[in-house]
Amino acid sequence: MKRQKLTPYLFLIPGCIILGAFIFYPMLQAIWLSLTEFNMIEDATFIGLENYENLLQDDLFWQTLMNTFIYLIGVVPALVIIPIFLAVLVNQNIKGISFFRSAFFIPVVTSLVVAGIAWDWVYKEHGLLNYALEVVGIITEPIGWLTSTSTALFAVMVVTVWKGLGYYMIIYLAGLQSIPSDLYEAAKIDGANWWQQVTRITIPMLMPFVLVVSIMSSISAMKVFEEIYVMTGGGPLHSSETLVFYIYTEAFSNLNMGYASAAGVILFIFTLILSIINLKVMGKKGNIR
C-alpha cells in the first residue's frame, strides 16, 4: 500500500529535475546576478539593490517599459478576439476547408526572420502598403512605417498579430470541436436562434480556451524580441524598443549582466502579476477555478 502511494511521486522526479535545472536554477541565478555588478570578464561583486535603484532612474528603462505595455494592450485583444471568428469560419463542414485552415496557419510556421524581411518590403517607403494607400487616395506621400518614431512600434505589432492568429485559431478550433453537438440540437428544438446559440453555448464553453489564449498571448507580448530585432533594431530613437530588447542590449552589447538581470527580474514580476490578473478576471467570467 505504501509502495502504491509512492509510485506517482517517482514519476514526477524526472519532470522536477528538468524544471529545476532549466527553470528554477536559472531564475535563482538571475535574482542573484541582479544584486551584483558582473561584466562576464571579472568576478561578480555584490552591490545589493543598486541595480534596481539605477533602473528606476533610467529614462530609457521607463520608455521601454511603456513600449512593452503599449505592445501588450495593442496585441493581446487582437490575438484573443480575432482567432475566435477565424475558428468559427474554418469550423464549417464545407468542401476545401482544409485549404483555408492551412492558409491561416502558414504564418505560424514561417520563420520570424523571413516574415520580418517580407514585411520590411511591405513597409518600405516605396513598398506595397504605401502604393496601395496612394492608389485609393488615403495618403499623398509615402510613409516610413519602420523609420518613423510614431509608427514603427505599431507596424511591428501588426506583424506579431498576423503571425499569431493561426496559432490561437487552432486552440479555439479544438475548443469548438469539443462542444457536444447535442447542445446545439437541443437549443434548436427549444427555438434558439444563431445568436442565442453563440452567446449561451459557444462562448461560455470556450471560456477555458479564452483564458489559455489570454495568458499565452500576454506572456508572448511581454517577451517580444525577434520581430523588433529583425525589423527595427529597437529604433528609431528607441521608439520600438521593448523591455526584452533593452535587457538583451544591456546584457550582450554593454556586458552589464547584473543590470540586465535586475530588469529581467522586474519583467518576471510584471508577467507574474499579469498572469494572476488574467486568471482572476477570465477565470471568474468562465467560472474556472
Image (cartoon, rainbow, N blue to C red):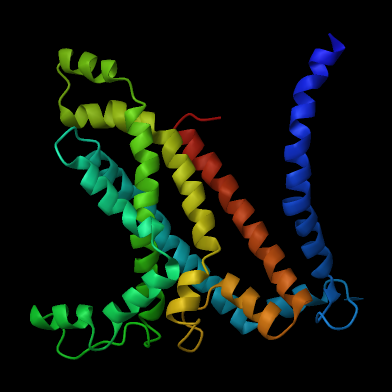
Up-down: is 267 above or below 168? below
Q: Is 15 placed above or below 182 here? A: below
- Horizontally, is 186 left or right of 208 in the view? left
* 202 in relation to 30, above or below: above
Residue 159 coordinates in the image, percent (x, y): 36, 67
Where is the N terminus found, in terms of image quarters?
Answer: top right
What is the residue that sits farthest to the top in this orientation?
Answer: 1
* 28 and 284: which is toward the camera: 28
Residue 262 image-quadrant placement: bottom right
23 lies left or right of 113: right
- Please tell me how many numbered marks the rendered image carries: 0
Can residue 166 be seen from the camera position used here? yes
Residue 36, position as x, y percentages in the image = 85, 74
Q: Residue at x 14, y 89 (%)?
A: 140
Query: In the figure, is residue 271 to the left or right of 31?
Result: left
Q: 220 and 63: which one is in front?
A: 220
Say if 91 sits above or below 137 in the image. Answer: above
**Can residue 46 be seen at all in this image of the molecule?**
no
| Residue in view at x 26 percent, y 88 percent | 125
Residue that protrudes farthest toward the left in the picture = 136
When asked about the image quadrant of residue 142, the answer is bottom left
The image position of residue 177, as x and y in percent, is 33, 29
On the image, the x and y values in percent for residue 153 come to: 41, 76
Look at the image and tell me in which quarter the C terminus lies.
Answer: top right
What residue do we see at 64% from left, 74% from top? 247
